[in-house]
Image (cartoon, rainbow, N blue to C red):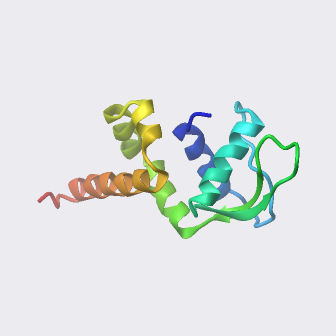
Amino acid sequence: MKHDLDLVRQILLRLRDKTDLKPAPVVVEGYEPVLVARHVMRLHDAGLVEGTVMRALGMEAPLVLATDLSLEGHNLLGALENKQVWSRLKEALSPEELASLPIKKLGEIAVDVATLWVRKKLGLND
């Protein structure tokens, strides 16, 4: 199963926009539930999503009943939510290159790009 960073971004946005902390599966329109579940599990394993993992025989993928983003998840989303940062990453790297990066490394790079963008906007270029 390929790692889909557009889906990752959508999952993070959905969790950030939740209005409560009730454990629930994440649903993203236009994506198969098993694909979403697998990506949420990866984000949970990386420490970006908080929730309870349910595993049962016969399930295609473990189900995470997500409650919220972790602080690290919020930080990653903060960088990826910036349209200039997201566009720059997608222009500079192919989908395969983006997908090959560990999610935490992608977060570090996105934060670096966001920092450079803010510094430029503030006239703080080095």
Residue 6 location, quadrant? top right
Residue beneath the point at 70% across and 30% down? 30
Residue beneath the point at 80% across and 40% down? 60
Residue beneath the point at 55% across and 61% down? 73
Residue nearer the viewer, 49 or 30:
49
**How many numbered badges does the structure rendering display?**
0
Residue beneath the point at 44% across and 40% down? 100
Task: In the displayed orientation, state which residue is furthest to the left.
Answer: 126
Residue 81 relative to residue 89: left or right: right
Residue nearer the viewer, 63 or 5:
63
Q: Position of residue 59 (x, y in %)?
A: 84, 44
Task: Locate the N terminus and report the quarter of the image it occupies.
Answer: top right
Residue nearer the viewer, 111 or 59:
59
Where 47 sits versus 97, above or below? below
Where 107 sits versus 5, above or below? below
Task: In the displayed orientation, state which residue is furthest to the right.
Answer: 57
